[in-house]
Image (cartoon, rainbow, N blue to C red):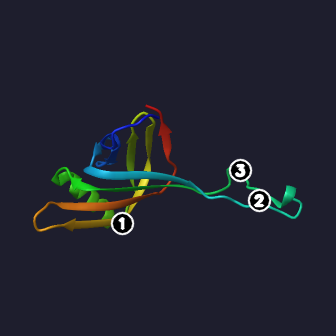
Amino acid sequence: MGAQKGKDLLLKMDVDNLGSFETVAGLRSRSISFNAETVDVTHQESAGQWRELLAGAGVKSARITGSGIFKDAPSDAAVREAFFNGHARQWQVVIPDFGTVQGPFQITSFELTGRHDGEVSFDLVLESAGELSFSTL
């Protein structure tokens, strides 16, 4: 993947639970990280006492963080509702020249900030809440 514009990484939510994804906010910064825990199966007879890991046995997770401004009142309401109801919703992360990650995420952190001479902005954290799928563009 070559150099890409950060603004092209999009965060979308299924706002009506019918499979139609909409970009929910004007994110100024965002990131996605994938994690896979390991299961250590090292034993006394492990070659040279080097650690051995059990392939495919750990828990996988993903975390999305973002900050920005809401693009409109409906997207503001959809994110707010998802947070206060504590429900996992279907989200998509479109990563240019890489692919699209889709699946259930729950908002685990939601912060609003504002300056007297500026706009209200937000920070949010989404944690994966089930199996994710990946498709190439």
For disc 3, the marked residue is: 55
Q: Hey, which quadrant is residue 96 in on the image? A: top left
Q: Position of residue 118 (x, y in %)?
A: 13, 61
Q: CA distance from mark 3 to mark 2?
A: 13 Å
Is 50 on the left or on the right of 114, as rendered?
right
For disc 2, the marked residue is: 51
Is 100 on the left or on the right of 14, as rendered?
right
Q: Position of residue 45 (x, y in %)?
A: 89, 60
Q: What's the amino acid at mark 3?
A: Ala
Crowd tier of the residue under label 1, counting other residues whose Cα lies within 10 Å: few below 14, some 14–19, many 20 or above: few
- Callout 1 secondary element: strand
Crowd tier of the residue under label 2, counting other residues whose Cα lies within 10 Å: few below 14, some 14–19, many 20 or above: few
Q: What's the amino acid at mark 2?
A: Arg
For disc 1, the marked residue is: 109
Q: Residue sitting at 24 percent across and 66 percent down?
A: 112
Q: Quadrant of the C terminus?
A: top left
In this view, which residue lies farthest toward the right?
A: 45
Q: Residue sitting at 47 percent across and 35 percent down?
A: 1
Question: Disc 3 or disc 2, which is closer to the eye?
Answer: 2
Q: In the rendered structure, which disc, 2 or 1, sits on the residue that comes first in sequence?
A: 2
Crowd tier of the residue under label 3, counting other residues whose Cα lies within 10 Å: few below 14, some 14–19, many 20 or above: few
